[in-house]
Amino acid sequence: MATTVIDDGLPVAVPDSGSPLRTQRSGENRAGWLLSAPFIVFYLIFLIGPALYGILMSFFNTTSVKSGLGAAVGLANYREVLTSSAFWGSMGHTLWFTVLTTPPLVILAFVFAILAERIRRGRALVRFIFFAPFVMPVTSVTMIFGWLFTAQIGLFPKWLSDIGISPPNFLGTTGWSFITVALLTVWWTVGFNFVLFLAGLQEIPTEVYEAAAIDGSTPRKTMWSITMPLLRPTIVLVTMLQILASLQIFNQMYLMTGGGPGTSTRPVMEFIYDYGFSDYRAGYAAAATMVYFVIVLVVSLVWFVLRRQTRKTVGA
Amino acid sequence: MTDNSVQRRTQPHPSPTRRTIVGAGLGAAAAELLSGCGSPVATGLFGLAPPSDKLTYWNLFSGGDGANMAKMEKVYERSHPSIDLSATTLSWGTPYYTKLALATAGGAPPDVGIVHLSRLDTFVEAGLLTPFPADELTAFGMPATNFTPRAAQKATVDGQLHAIPLDTHPFVMYYNIPVCRKAGLLDADDNLKPIHGPAELTAALLAAKKVTGHYGGVVAVIGDPATNLRYFSTLYYQAGGTYIADAGQKITIDNDKAAQVLTFMRNLTKSGLMPATINDAGVLSLFSTGKAGFLFDGEWDIPTYRATPLNGKFNVVPIPHIFGPKPVAYADSHSFVIPRNSAMDKNRRAMVLTFIKTMLENSLIWAGGGHVPAWTPVRDSAAFKALKPQANYVAAAETAMYDPPAWYSGAGSDFENIIGAAVANSQSGVSSASSAVGQMWSGLRPYADAKAPVG
């Protein structure tokens, strides 16, 4: 999965114009650049470089299996992407997956974090249990769930038949395939959001709760008037991170359904993979990537705006 | 996913641990490189030649074919103990071809690989394969005349052989011997009496249906576009139809012929002679339990039916001649190719050619999986002629028609999925014949209009 780098948004100290401080700062600057040089080199070579090359490729009929850019085609690739029902279909599948996974992954993580925070004994064990699935590699997770959900011999179909419910075809129909992969994803990644919420909850000073208790606040009122507002930055952060992560769905879908039946569950990342690698149309796939990038960028900008507003109201 | 720090409570400034992460990553990568001298990683990164006694071979065979291939590899390893054969089986279809193409383009291909002949043209056009000059093949005892002519012809691109065919695997007709005997469709030796034309096939299916009480015949319709394509293509090619021309840039579907064939196929399901909505599992169940007298399927499923109670009670023949002036069988072939590779020298190539020759000479083992060997010394041997039912449909290999060449066609391709899906819609009655033909056109249109990535 791609890495989402989040700017933590902490204010940068404005440099003073005094001269001794300036030399000190420039020395610090040099050290800073030197220390980050290894990362910057990697970033340029493996992220910025390929991204720029991708933009260039999107204007050419580039082929994955031949060197060079191929013939220039102007905006033809973009025109084909924007008018392709297969592309927008897969974009729709990605959005549907995001809609299916984001609410449970945010709400469940929140509920689990609240409950785990209240436990007095074995807190570490509970945290470990919720976070443990997240460290598993996607191949193992999909293999386990593949066996659980497989028709005829899977554990879930068997349980359902045992209690007299005829099991749906979990991986053979479009509707259920989405739900199956969403269930897998919730189980697998809820631990990450859970940890973020836990950290947010621990940030709330206990004095506030004590004051509320002294004032005779009910647990529900404490939740609504203290926990929720003070946790708002974390809620916004988790929600946006989750939307961005869900928009990048590829691994689980590719491994569980291969985008099937047909291409009815193929997410947009797999569309790009299929066209860029299986069909050798690197230039066209690069154009599709750029369109997808713009869409994700818009979502990120929404987060940016929301975060600024949150900071203003919370005053952090 | 994200490496967002969660230590805000103890530290006002979250301390990114990216450096340690990168450091750890570098360490791991270095460790892998060090431990992998002579490994594919080292070969790929530094262009080092692989050890001279190691032969890498990629294929896509699992199941019965995979077991047979492993047996043939054993034979080779026993006769060439000094060579370390490293055979890798990858997922069938598009994933395999994607990996083979990108590994070759990336300069780290296997020494020898398997390619379906229906996929060959694209690989050649992309410049991923090396040709086999006629004198080289003769020198290694594999003259082109020793192969099934249709397969050798399909393996020839731009006037040169680019693949060495291993087999031809046609789409065929299975029949249940007790059912067909009762229906009076067999001769004195229990062989199926010749069936010719749509009326005779319909009559045979009707006679079988009367015996089984369920269906006359069966073919997978749901969830199996490839089988739909093969079944339709057999009859459509017989009728003289074509799909595409100019390496896929032009659609040449003959609407009338396609509609005629689809209507015939739909009538069989509409009248209840064959089930209209059935998947692979249902097909296996119906034919293996004698609820259908005939089955249209690939010969590679013979081992599957041998493992059912039907073992010994079925026979396999080419699909009858239904339309057009001459019989045609839809088929594909597995073949050996040598990918373009800067690390390939004369000695290594000789090693690969010897490997291929050994495989061909032992292709009687391969025929056990239902395939017709392309290597005529085996195909014409007494041992193969005694191999039933394989020997029954050698004729299908001689009249084989393949998927048309295009960058989007071939085994497991988008072409097969598009045509197959339209045929399934017609067979199950979801779409009329003419609208199914329309779906073929509209499905192929974006591919034909797109600028071809190769060629």
Image (tube, grey):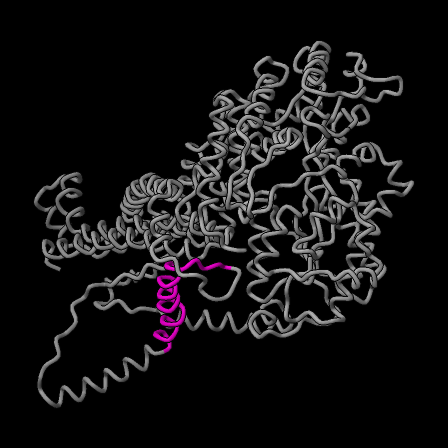
The residue most toward the right is B382
Q: Which residues are magenta?
A: A38-64
Magenta residue check for B152 = no
Question: How many numbered marks, from 0 up?
Answer: 0
In the depicted structure, whether residue A197 falls above or below residue B240: below
Seen in the image, is A255 located left or right of residue B311? left
Compare residues A14 and B202 and report the one nearer the observer: B202
In the depicted structure, whether residue A76 falls above or below residue B421: below
Residue B194 visible in rendering: yes
Residue B358, given in percent of the width and then of the height, sits at: 82, 56
- Image quarter (top left, top right, bottom left or bottom right) of the C terminus of chain B: bottom right
Compare residues B269 and A273 and report the one nearer the observer: B269
Seen in the image, is A191 located left or right of residue B159? left
Residue B89, given in percent of the width and then of the height, sits at: 66, 52
Q: Which SS does the magenta portion mostly show?
A: helix
Q: Which residue is painted at 42% across and 47% down in the image?
A: A188
The residue most toward the front is B325
Compare residues A247 and A180 and report the one nearer the observer: A247
Q: Which residue is painted at 57% across and 33% down in the image?
A: B224
Seen in the image, is B310 located left or right of residue A262? right
Residue B88 visible in rendering: no
Residue A233, given in percent of the width and then of the height, sits at: 19, 53
Q: Which residue is painted at 83% across and 63% down in the image?
A: B139
Residue B31, given in percent of the width and then of the height, sits at: 55, 72
Magenta residue check for A53 = yes
In the depicted structure, whether residue B183 falls above or below residue A236: above
Q: Which residue is painted at 48% across and 53% down in the image?
A: A137
- Image quarter (top left, top right, bottom left or bottom right) of the N terminus of chain B: bottom left
